[in-house]
Amino acid sequence: MKNTTYVPLKNDLLLKLIERYKEDYPLAIDDVIEEFLERTSDTDTARPGFREGGYIWDQLELPAGTQLRTRYFDEWQIGTLKDGKFYYKNRIYKSPAKLCNAMRGNKNSNAWMMLQIKRPQDIEFRKAEKFRD
């Protein structure tokens, strides 16, 4: 039998896991963590953009050079990801949510719904919410 350690997990997240995986939810958690550790290992060369100043937003990897934009009063407001931080109008923001709020007049906004993203490998901007599908 493997040793087990208990870690805090948001109740609503746990309930969703149980609903989807039933009694197998502990195995699902193990699988996701193992996959994450493999994907983010130091020897992983498939993700140089992240290690060189990118950002992971939930499950979305944003490499350095990614542009994020939102329309505010009929004008595009554009921020850029560099050194793991978001830059907009000579200010630094630590998350897409904080960047989005700043670009929208410091109003609380749902960044997933309001931002569009263009990574360096992309040809055009796409709605952030489309990356969650």
Image (spheres, grey):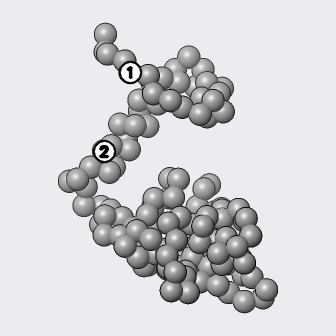
Cα gap from disc 1 to disc 2, whole angstroms:
20 Å
Neighbourhood count class around disc 2 (C-alpha, 10 Å): few under 14, some 14–19, many 20 upward: few
Return the mark for residue 38. Answer: 2
Question: For the view shown, which residue lies furthest in the left direction?
Answer: 43
The structure residue drawn at horizontal position 44% and vertical position 71%, both measured from the top left corner, is 85
Residue 4 rendering spot, x and y as whole percentages: 37, 18
In the rendered image, residue 79, in percent from the top left (x then y), is placed at: 55, 80
Q: Is residue 127 visible?
A: no
Q: Which residue is mark 1?
A: 5
- Mark 1 is surrounded, within 10 Å at the Cα level, by few (under 14), some (14 to 19) or many (20 or more) other residues, namely few
Q: Earlier in the sequence, mark 1 or mark 2?
A: 1
The residue lying furthest to the top in this view is 1
Q: In this image, 120 relative to 117: left or right? A: left
Q: Give the number of the mark in front: 1 or 2.
A: 1
Instruction: Please provide percent x and percent y for residue 96.
Output: 57, 66
Image-based side of 123 in relation to 73, left or right: left
Residue 1, placed above or below residue 104: above
- Give residue 41's position: percent from left, percent from top: 27, 49
Q: Amino acid at mark 2?
A: Glu
Horizontal arrangement in the rendering, residue 114 relative to residue 22 (left or right): right
